[in-house]
Image (tube, rainbow, N blue to C red):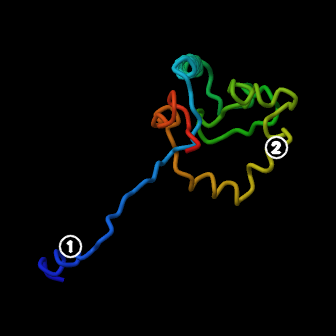
Amino acid sequence: MSDDEATEFYEDEDETFEFDGRPYLFEPEYTEEELRERRERREIERQRAEEAAASRATTQPRITGRWWCSCRCCEIMPTDMECFCCKEWDLLHRRSQDARCVTLAEGFSSLLDLWVLEAFFHVPKLNWARRPTPEGPDGHLSTE
């Protein structure tokens, strides 16, 4: 198609295309206070992880035995970094308080399902903190 034909094609169109898509319209909303608390929590967790990594560097290698395992279900892995007990991670510890090990928790087996794993690794990662402000009154969603 030549440039003249393309120009004629677009000039002949009576309707103009208007895009009214508003992506992320129904994403969770956080207040500035909640965002600040989340950032502080992440910073505390990062500091704890750094401290734990520093203390691991000064102790004996984990690949030499299971002395580091608190749940009694861990396996020795090829590297020290991979030798990690579920009880050392605060996020998992809070969620699996009733179970001796996160792998023994009620819902853990469903996480190992092939369909769940494939779906999880194909979902794009989103930054929930950087969402656009809704266009409704007071920055909330509008029903109109």
Distance, label 2 to label 1, CA atoms, is 60 Å
User: For mark 2, what is the residue?
Assistant: 107
In the image, 77: left or right of 1?
Answer: right
Secondary structure category for the residue under label 1: helix
Q: Position of residue 17 (x, y in %)?
A: 35, 63
Where residue 32 appears, x then y in whole percent? Answer: 51, 20
Q: Position of residue 137 (x, y in %)?
A: 51, 31
What residue is shown at x 75% (from left), y 28% (from top)?
A: 69
Question: Closer to us: mark 2 or mark 1?
Answer: 1
Callout 2, which amino acid? Gly
Image quarter in which the C terminus is found: top right
Dividing the picture into quadrants, the one containing residue 5 is bottom left
Judge whether 58 appears above or below 140 on screen: above
**How busy is the neighbourhood of tag 1: few (under 14 within 10 Å), some, or many (20 plus)?**
few
Instruction: Check disc 2 and report its element: helix, strand or loop.
Output: loop
What residue sits 82% from the left and 43% below the top? 107
Instruction: Kindly check if marks 2 and 1 are in contact, taking CB atoms under 8 A apart as contact.
Output: no
Question: Would you say 81 lies left or right of 127 here?
Answer: right
* x, y percent for residue 19: 39, 57
The residue pinned by badge 1 equals 11
Q: Nearer the viewer, residue 14 or 26?
A: 14
Q: Which amino acid does label 1 sit on?
A: Glu
Q: Which of 3 and 71 is in front in this view?
A: 3
Q: Mark 2, residues whose alpha carbon is within 10 Å: few (<14), some, or many (≥20)?
A: few
Disc nearer the start of the sequence (2/1) = 1
- Asked if residue 8 is positioned above or below residue 104 in the image, the reply reads below
Between 142 and 91, the one lying in front of the other is 142
Q: Nearer the viewer, residue 62 or 81?
A: 81
Residue at 59% in and 36% down: 28
